[in-house]
Image (tube, rainbow, N blue to C red):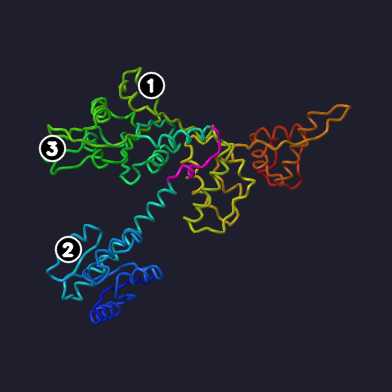
Amino acid sequence: MIQKRILVVDDDESLRWVTQAQLQQAGYQVDASASGDDALDRIHDAPADLVITDLMMPGMSGVELLKKIRTDYPEVIVILVTAFGTVENAVEAMKAGAYDYITKPVNIDELLLIVRRGLEHLDLREEVRNLRSSLDKKYGFENILGQSKTLLHVLDLASRAAQATSTVLIHGETGTGKELLAKAVHFNSRRKEKPFVTINCGAIPKDLLESELFGHVKGSFTGAFANKRGKIETADGGTLFLDEIGEMPMELQVKLLRLIQQGEIEKLGVASVTKVDVRIIAATHRNLPAMVEDGAFREDLYYRLAVIPLELPPLRERADDVPELVQDFFVKAKEKQGRSNLVLPASLLPYFCAYRWPGNVRELENVIERIVVLSRGDDITLNDLPEFLRRERPVAEEFHFDLPPQGISLEGVEKELIVRALEKFTWNQTHAAQYLDISRKTLIYRMEKFGLRKEQVGPEDQPAT
């Protein structure tokens, strides 16, 4: 762990020396300075994490030093030391950005406590900054993988929508990444410092959904033993993501419409309204216009939600993106499962591309993790793939041969392909049939048709007679 640097600033040499020695004894790396100007020079040459400065000094005062540090080195924690009679000045200095103050005569235990809290505050700020940076990277639009035209079009619209405050409605099949896109919109918007709150409207019983969304007060219904803030109020200033909005009951759709139109909610058990500022991003896999036609979804709410509609394409419509997704999920799964030596041959990628992925990106990610966990050796083979992937025959590479001028026997070509497939798998009929994308029964019939047999094959591989 990196040792924190502290700078003690005091024109009283004896007090400066005592404070420095006591802090060093406590395990800190401490430097000392007799004036504000010298302190700034030292911070410039050797950045400090925390500064302890006397309030009253000749030349540059502690308050002036504080203001310069706040301007040039805003991350530095500043603690002021003041005589009892100038506490009011110290309080004013705290308003200017000081972390805390301590009065003379200085109690070393009290000072060490303030120093420790100040450095913990510094660490916390660093953690928050790192977390925010990681969130920006994790939820950046560039991390939604794929280069297909349909996906890039959606990401372009979403990046522009992020700069606005309008409601967004994301439509897409299950597993296409609707929540990931919603987070990208939020974390690239001006609200990214505020909460991103998710609620799945289809996962909460209807009789509890209103309380979860809008909150309630104690005694408003049976089981309401205490006041509760709803998800909407929790998201105040930020973004509320309503997943599976098509499952919201009609009676709650009216209240949601009021939130969008007037920016206010009514908690259960409260007659007055509460003002909130939230941006709504909704998502659904259902056909909302059809639900509007059937009277299952409010038309006015639909148009309020769909100010900016975003349509996420299913994976089967962006097959060109599959290899990139496979490689990305494979690297992450290897790291997660501690299998860094595992290799996925490029020859297996066509099997992933041939499958239609009804569960979309989520299904692909889960399948990759399953393969990483269950594969036996360091090289993944065809047999390590799930059976449903092996069933999907990849598009064969185009093979060329010259048509002879005298004509060609179609049966001869068929016979040759069957012989080569059988030889490729040492006459194992099951594997040869899978390779040719025909049933074993069909293969046996064609082997009999062409009189194909292999001497000394096992009974299970003998053609039926």
Residue 98 in the image: state x and y as whole percent: 24, 62
Q: Which circle, 3 or 2, is nearer the viewer?
A: 2
- When asked about the image quadrant of residue 423, the answer is top right
- The furthest residue to the left: 219
| Viewport quadrant of the C terminus | top right
Task: Give the residue drawn at x 34%, y 20%.
Answer: 292
Look at the picture and state if 19 lies above or below 172: below
Q: Which circle, 1 or 3, is nearer the viewer?
A: 1
Tag 3 residue: 222
Specify few, some or many for label 1: CA neighbours under 10 Å numbering under 14, 14-19, or 20 or more: some
Tag 2 residue: 89
Closer to the chain start, of discs 1 and 2, is 2
Q: How many marks?
A: 3
Residue 271 in the image: state x and y as whole percent: 12, 32
- Tell me the amino acid under the disc marked 2: Asn
Q: Main secondary structure of the magenta part?
A: loop
What stretch of residues is rendered in magenta?
Answer: 139-149
- When asked about the image quadrant of residue 103, the answer is bottom left
Please indicate whether residue 349 sits to the left or right of residue 403 in the image: left
Task: Give the residue drawn at x 26%, y 75%.
Answer: 10
Q: CA distance from mark 1 to mark 3?
A: 37 Å
Look at the picture and state if 225 lies above or below 94: above
Tag 1 residue: 289
Q: CA distance from mark 1 to mark 2?
A: 65 Å
